[in-house]
Image (cartoon, rainbow, N blue to C red):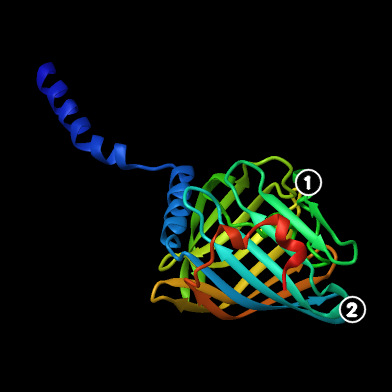
Amino acid sequence: MLKLKSALLFSALALSLPSLLLAQTAEEKGLEIATAARAYDRGFGDFTADMVMTLKNRTGQTSTRQIRIKTLEVENDGDKSLSIFDEPKDVKGTAMLTFSHGLEPDDQWLYLPALKKVKRINSRNKSGPFMGSTFAFEDLGSQEVEKYTYRLKGEEPCGEWQCYLIERFPAYKHSGYTRQLVWVDKEAYRLVKAEYYDRKKTLLKTLSGSDFQQFLEHYWRAGKMEMVNHQNGKSTLLEWKNYQFKTGLSDRDFRSQALKRLK
């Protein structure tokens, strides 16, 4: 009788073993989704776009800036991106160059025409605001999977889609954030919303994406991105247009030494 009970117990364990092996922790599932989202967006090569940046202060006053964007996908590394300011006159010619990486600090350079100097951004200072906006320097690089650790918190509706709700924690030094909550739709991994918590673990900013457009019958990009700072009452709206993919950009279009000569 004892042998029979042991055999039955062993059989029950054997039957349940596959499900035990397949069970994932919330951390493993969060990482899996982040990895799938990054893989889904690979292969676009490069793109250019025009952007209107609208800054709004606490009292509702606004100012706008016209910016050209260039982005190059890099094999086995983060993207390279270049932002060139065309208007207004007081910022015309300003350029920001970013080489995104994983756990290594992103390389970033800022050219200020008034100083006629290219300034390298120190990794310790990347939590500061970019050109008076509510976006920090660290918000501007591509979101490499290695930059964070993850935890899936659940699923919930997000507008017209159903979203994964993922909590992620910066794994790199000198981040201005302790954690972020991101809502990513389950269909095409569009980043619909993100909340950023400061070093005191208090809600600092919320990013909202809308007017998504599909390119090359696969890649999705937000037509509008708004970052609201809940602590100082400021906000920044980015409106994207004139996307062009696979334009033939290469590494030579993203050289820090050439920032002074950009037109």
Work out whether 34 lies above or below 216.
Answer: above
Q: Position of residue 10 (x, y in %)?
A: 18, 26
Quarter of the image for residue 173 reads top right
Which quadrant of the figure contains the C terminus?
A: bottom right
Mark 2 falls on what kind of element? loop
Give the mark, 2 or 1, whose residue is nearer the N terminus: 2
Work out whether 23 lies above or below 153.
Answer: above
Depth check, mark 2 against mark 1: the one in front is 1
Kind of residue indicated by mark 1: Asn
In percent of the image, x 83 and y 66: which residue is there? 132
In percent of the image, x 77 and y 50: which residue is there? 121
Quarter of the image for residue 56 reads bottom right
Q: Position of residue 163 (x, y in %)?
A: 48, 65
Q: State the residue in front, 162 or 10.
A: 162
Say how many tags the image has: 2
Q: Position of residue 240 (x, y in %)?
A: 62, 78
In percent of the image, x 80 and y 48: which residue is there? 125
Does residue 42 appear left or right of residue 50 in this picture?
A: left
Q: Residues within 10 Å of mark 2 (few under 14, many from 20)?
A: few
Mark 1 falls on what kind of element? loop
Does residue 243 appear left or right of residue 109 in this picture?
A: left
Q: State the residue in front, 28 or 138.
A: 138
Kind of residue indicated by mark 2: Thr
Q: Position of residue 74 (x, y in %)?
A: 51, 54
Work out whether 204 lies above or below 223.
Answer: above
Q: State the residue in front, 120 or 38.
A: 120
Per the model, the C-alpha gap separating discs 2 and 1 is 32 Å
**Which disc is residue 122 wearing?**
1
Q: Which residue is mark 2?
A: 59
Which quadrant of the figure contains the N terminus?
A: top left
Does residue 247 appear left or right of residue 175 in this picture?
A: left
